Image (cartoon, helix red, strand yellow):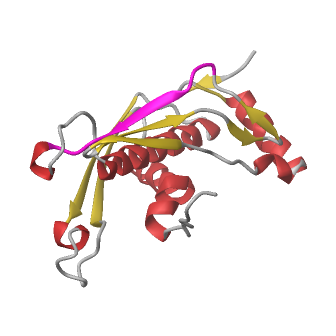
Amino acid sequence: MSRMINGVDRDALQATVAAVQDDQTLAAFEFRLANRWIDGGLNRSTVGAFHGTNMEHHRAQPFELVNDEPPVLLGADRGPNPVEHVLHALAGCLTTSLVYHAAARGVRIEAVRTRFVGDLDLRGFLGLDPSVRNGYREIRVAFEIDGDLTAAQKVELVRLAKARSPVFDIVRHGVPVACALAG
């Protein structure tokens, strides 16, 4: 019988870790997304198949994500804007990393709540000041963790989330992005 902690099957988690330790090729994943511009600030991304564990995986139904801008940024507010999606991705990844690592250690969590604030100066995006960064200058995250844990355990879980979150790593350290015309 599996040991579920925080909604995570610890036996399956341990089996996954063991399988990757035995065959490191299982660790290589390729995630993909296709995007299509619709109008103004509105564009739609579709997330479907991905490659991992040496095979192609197909979702039962592709996911659609919408990007738009609020009216103050000349959009029609039909969805979060791209920099808000970055905060959402960071939130999801930090939370998942925290919960999975807690489960791996047998630590039960009742709730995790986070607040994200990103500071962005439009002068960079608008090309008005080359010394101003185009993206976020800073992102601040506040965690609230409920459960029968000490303050030290909560601090350790936040440390583990930061240390192991792929999206935190991408945001914190950047990643090379190659842009080219198709064809």
Q: Residue at x 53, y 42 (%)?
A: 34
Q: How far from the left and from the top, in percent, is residue 137?
A: 27, 69
Give, as a single range, the part of the protein colored magenta: 60-70
Please give the name of the residue rendered at 60% of the width and 44% of the height, measured from the top-left corner. 32
Spot the residue most to the bottom: 131
Which of these two is toward me, 183 or 167? Answer: 183
Q: Is residue 50 above or below residue 169?
A: above
Q: Does the magenta stretch include residue 63?
A: yes
11 horizontally vs 76: left or right: right
Residue 24: in magenta span: no
Residue at (48% x, 49% y) in the render: 157
Residue 27, percent across and down?
Answer: 76, 49
Instruction: Point out the residue furthest to the right here.
Output: 22
Residue 89 vs 49, above or below: the answer is: below
**Which residue in the rendered view is the most extreme toward the top?**
1
The quadrant holding residue 118 is: bottom left
Quarter of the image for the C terminus: give it.
Answer: bottom right
Asked whether residue 121 is in view, the answer is: no
Residue 26 left/right relative to 119:
right
Give x and y (percent) for residue 89.
Answer: 43, 45
Q: Nearer the viewer, residue 99 or 171?
A: 171
Q: On the image, which quarter does residue 122 sit in?
A: bottom left
Which residue lies most toward the front here?
183
The answer to whether residue 62 is above or below residue 97 is: above
Quadrant for the N terminus in the image: top right
Q: Is residue 75 visible?
A: yes
Q: Is residue 25 left or right of residue 145?
A: right
Residue 94 in picture, x, y percent from top left: 46, 47
Question: Which one is nearer the viewer's eye here, 126 or 20?
Answer: 126
How many badges with numbers are in the image? 0
Position of 8 relative to 96 (above/below):
above
